[in-house]
Amino acid sequence: MKYIELNNGFKIPMVGLGTVGLNGNEGKELIKDAIKVGYRLIDTARMYNNEICVGEAIKESKIERSELFITTKLNQTSYNYLKAKEDIEDSLHKLQLDYIDLLLIHEPYKCSYDMYEAIKEAYLDGKIKAIGISNFNEKCYLEFIESCGMIPMINQLESHIYFTQEELRKKMLEKKVYMQAWSPLANGKGDLFNEPTLINLSHKYNKTPAQIALRFLIQRHIGVIPKTSNRDRLVENMNIFDFELMEEEMKDLFKLDQNKSVTSWYRNDWF
Ligand SMILES: NC(=O)c1ccc[n+]([C@@H]2O[C@H](COP(=O)([O-])OP(=O)(O)OC[C@H]3O[C@@H](n4cnc5c(N)ncnc54)[C@H](OP(=O)(O)O)[C@@H]3O)[C@@H](O)[C@H]2O)c1
């Protein structure tokens, strides 16, 4: 596994497991399998309603805590400073952890600044190792860093071959804010796995279209958190560090950018 150093010196694995829809015994066993095959980053959120399942998987995997990197996210139900403080404790309890590696504000909310006060406090208390935001588009991001009092370490965004968000990535680099891609496989939409450019490259490098799509991201220092409920694909999605796309090939992949979300969930008018 490769790691990237965040702007506070803390290191994050470049590939993690997304856990939307993973729950119950089946979800728990899959997360344990992911840890067994080498995943070290697990991405959950209070919104996914599966922190208990993630916590049980971690405990049963019997892996050293320091080897794992656990992300969770607060949403608008943590609507003010006190509620956010309470919910951080609740997440720690559900995950059965003494600290959370990364805590994000799930989307830009009117109460983001209040929430962030509680997040910063927990960070300074050592209950959180890195803090960040998610789905903050350029306008929200620039406004937020103006007055949030501590530059976030991460902005987790929808990003894949059809929606690269390259301009925002470059803007964030100025402050060493690391971009992590959610839906790095475009949520399996837009016929990504049959995309001719990906298929051609997959033949050249003896990789799958999914591996080429993920490589396109990590080669630009973007972390990825693909979700799969298939055990073979768990291994496939991690196995992306033994080849390198050429500059011209990266340019060809950029030509697929439609500069818009493929998910119905993403809104560009947040906040
Ligand atoms: N911060 C946010 O607001 C936000 C929003 C959305 C998602 N997320 C995070 O990002 C994670 C990933 O996003 P996502 O679940 O929307 O989409 P994704 O990872 O881009 O795509 C998942 C889809 O691709 C399929 N798949 C995965 N690996 C594959 C492979 N190697 N070959 C073929 N198909 C493959 C999966 O099916 P199988 O399961 O059948 O393999 C699933 O249908 C989420 O789980 C969540 O943790 C964050």
Image: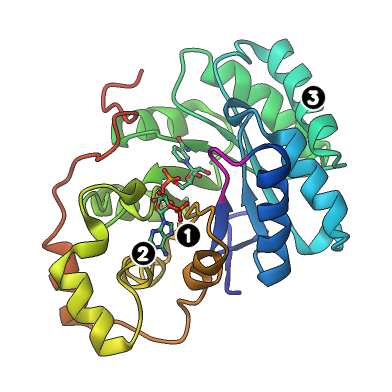
For the residue carrying disc 2, how many other residues have a C-alpha within 10 Å: few (<14), some (14-19), or many (20+)? many
Q: Is residue 20 magenta?
A: yes
Q: Is residue 99 magenta?
A: no
Along the viewing direction, whichever of 257 and 234 lies nearer the viewer: 234
- For disc 1, the marked residue is 223
- For disc 3, the marked residue is 90
Q: Is residue 129 visible?
A: no
**Which amino acid type corresponds to the residue marked 2 in the rendered image?**
Leu
Q: Which mark is residue 146?
A: none
- 134 sits to left or right of 118: left
Dot 2 or dot 1, earlier in sequence: 2
For the residue carrying disc 1, how many other residues have a C-alpha within 10 Å: few (<14), some (14-19), or many (20+)? many
Q: Find numbered disc 3 in the image and state the secondary structure of the residue it sits on.
A: helix
The answer to whether mark 2 and mark 1 are in CB contact below 8 A is yes
Q: Residue at x 86, y 50 (%)?
A: 59
Q: Above or below — where is 180 with respect to 86? A: below
Dot 1 or dot 3, earlier in sequence: 3
Q: Find numbered disc 2 in the image and state the secondary structure of the residue it sits on.
A: helix
> What is the quadrant of the N terminus in the image?
bottom right
Dot 2 or dot 3, earlier in sequence: 3
The residues bearing labels 1 and 3 have C-alpha atoms spaced at a distance of 27 Å
Q: Residue at x 53, y 13 (%)?
A: 111
The magenta stretch is: 18-22
> What is the quadrant of the C terminus in the image?
top left
> In the rendering, at what x and y percent does residue 137 appear?
33, 34
Q: How many marks?
A: 3
The answer to whether mark 2 and mark 3 are in CB contact below 8 A is no
Image quadrant where residue 37 sits: bottom right
Q: Residue at x 88, y 60 (%)?
A: 62
**Which amino acid type corresponds to the residue marked 3 in the rendered image?**
Asp
- 185 sits to left or right of 133: left
